Image: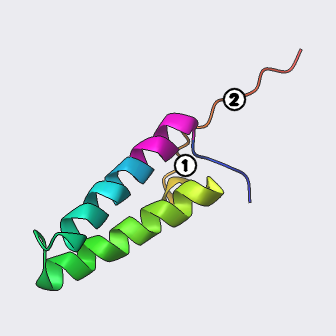
Amino acid sequence: MKKNMGTWDRMLRTGVALVIAVLIVTKIVTGTLGIVLGVIAAMFLLTSAIGFCPLYVLFKFSTCRVKKED
C-alpha cells in the first residue's frame, strides 16, 4: 500500500476527527447523526494513521509530495 496522503491532509483529518469526538462526548451531537459522524471520525483517524485513503485511489488523487529523483 503506497501512501497517498500528505502531512497537512493527515493533520486536517485528525483535527476534524477530534472536533467530532468532542461534539459527541459533550452530547452536542447525538442519535443517528452522532453515530454517522462517529464512524466518519473513526475512518478519518484510521486513514490518517496509515497515510492511505482508498477513495483517493478510486479517484486517482494524492496529497502526498512527489519525490524528485535526480
Q: Position of residue 10 (x, y in %)?
A: 51, 46
Q: Does 66 sit above or below residue 59?
A: above
The secondary structure type at the circle numbered 1 is: loop
Q: x, y (%) of residue 18?
A: 35, 57
Mark 2, secondary structure of its residue: loop
Image: 7 above or below 70: below
- Image: magenta residue range: 6-13
Residue ID at (20%, 77%): 34
Type of amino acid under label 1: Lys
In the depicted structure, whether residue 64 falls above or below residue 48: above
Residue 23: image x %, image y %? Answer: 19, 64
Q: Is residue 30 visible?
A: yes
- Does the magenta stretch mainly form a helix, a strand or a loop? helix
Q: Which mark is residue 60?
A: 1
> Observer-nearest residue: 55 or 39?
39
Residue at (31% x, 74% y) in the render: 38
Residue 66 is labelled as 2
Residue at 26% across, 71% down: 37
Left or right: where does residue 28 sit relative to residue 49?
A: left
